[in-house]
Image (cartoon, rainbow, N blue to C red):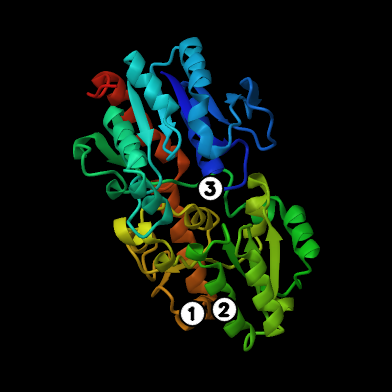
Amino acid sequence: MRILYVASGIPLPGRLGGSVHTLEVARGLAARGHTVQVVAAQTGQHLPLRAKKALVEGLPVVYLDWPKSLSFLGLPSVGRVVRAFRPDVVMERYYNFAGCGIYWAHRLGLPSLLEVNALIVDPPEVPKRRLDDLLGGPMRRWAVRQCLWATRIVTPLHTTVPPEVPRERIVEIPWGANTAHFRPEVRSERAGEVAARRDRLGLPRQARVVVFLGTFRAWHGAMEFVQAGMQLAARRPEVCFLLVGEGPQRPAAEALCRKSGLEGRFRFTGGVPYEEVPLYLALAEVGVAPFQTRYHPALRAAGFFWSPLKIFEYMAMGLPVVTTAVSPLDRIVRPGEEGLLVAEGDVAGLASAIAALLDAPEQARAMGQNARRRVVAEYSWERHCERLERVLEEAVRSGTAEGGL
C-alpha cells in the first residue's frame, strides 16, 4: 500500500513519546513492504511558507512547521502532498487543531484511518473544554466530524472516541517498544558506553540504580518517584535514583532533592536522544512508572487510555516494573510476574515495592525475564504494525466512511 501518514506538529526525529511513536510506526509499516510518506514538523523550526522535504532514517518526510495550534493552516500544503503522492490510504495522528489529512481523504474519496492517542472530547473541568463550550463547541464539532469521516479509528482504548462514532469502526491497539533497540544484551554488548554514562553521571560502581523515564508532568508521577526515593535513600545508602527526561516539573523535583539534603543520591539526565535511552536503562535494576491519574481529568473520565511507552521499554530491557494499580496497567504488569503494583498516590507503598524488588534480586531478575518475553510477544512495535497493517487493509477494502462537507 501507499500510505500517507500525517502527524501535524510532531517533531521528527524527536525525544518525546509522540515522536518515537510516529517514527516507529512509519518505519514498521515501511519494513512490512509499504511505501510510506510522512508529514511532520522539524525539530528546528523554519518559516512555514513552503513545505520542506527530507529523509529521516530513510523515510521521506515533508516538513510543515506551522505552530501546533495552527496546524490546519497547512491544509493547502497537505492537499498538494496528497495529490502528488497518490496514496491508497491516508492515516492521520489526531490533534485538536489538525485534521488536514482526514479532510483531504474525505474530499477526494480516499480511505482513511484516524490514529487517536488521547481523549478527543475533554471533560468539562479542562480549560480547553470550557473555552470551547463558551464559543459554542466548534472544536468538539470538528473533532467528531473527523471521527465520522475516518474509515477506521485506531486507539489504545475505545473510550477516547466520541459515542457518535460506531463502535465497529474503532480498533484498540496498544503502543509498543522497539525490542531490537531495547534489549537486555545492551548491558554486555555496549558495556563501554554504559560505563561511560555511569561515570559521566557520577554513579558509584557499586550503586544499585532505580530509574524513572519520561516527561516531568504531574500525572507521570516524577514527584512521587522523588518522594519515594527520598524515603528509601534515608535508609538504603547503596541505592541511587536516575531520572531520564525533561518537562515542567523537573525544577521542582530537583529543588525537592536539594531541600532534603539527599541530592547526591539523585541524578537528572535531562532529555536524551532516543537511540541512547537503552544505555541509561541498562544502568538500572528496577523501572518505575508511578502514573497519577488524579492530575489528569481525561484519564479519570475515560480510563487509562495512555499507552505506557516507558513501561514497554523497561520490559524490553528486562527490568521488573513498579507501576500504578489501574486498568489496563494491571494487565500489562501482572503483580509478581512482570513486576509490582502500587495504589495511586501511595508514596510509602511505592518505596516499599521498590525495596522489595531490590531485596529479592533473583525474583526481580525472573520478573524482568518474564517482562521481556511478554513485551516481545504482545507489546512490540513490530506487533503493533502487524495489527495496524490489517486495519489499514480493511480500511482500503471498505472504502471511505460516510459523511459530507
Mark 1: amino acid: Val
Q: Is residue 164 above or below residue 184?
A: above
Q: Residues within 10 Å of mark 3 (few under 14, many from 20)?
A: some
Disc 1 on helix, strand or loop? helix
Q: Is residue 330 above or below residue 361?
A: above
The answer to whether residue 366 is left or right of residue 204 is left
Q: Is residue 262 visible?
A: no
Q: Are marks 1 and 2 in contact (CB under 8 Å)?
A: yes
The answer to whether residue 209 is left or right of residue 201 is left
Mark 2: amino acid: Gln
* Residue identified by numbered label 1: 347
Mark 3: amino acid: Gly
Q: Quarter holding the C terminus?
A: top left
Disc 2 on helix, strand or loop? helix
Q: Residues within 10 Å of mark 1 (few under 14, many from 20)?
A: many
- Rendered location of residue 282, percent (x, y): 64, 59
The tag earlier along the polypeptide, 1 or 3, is 3
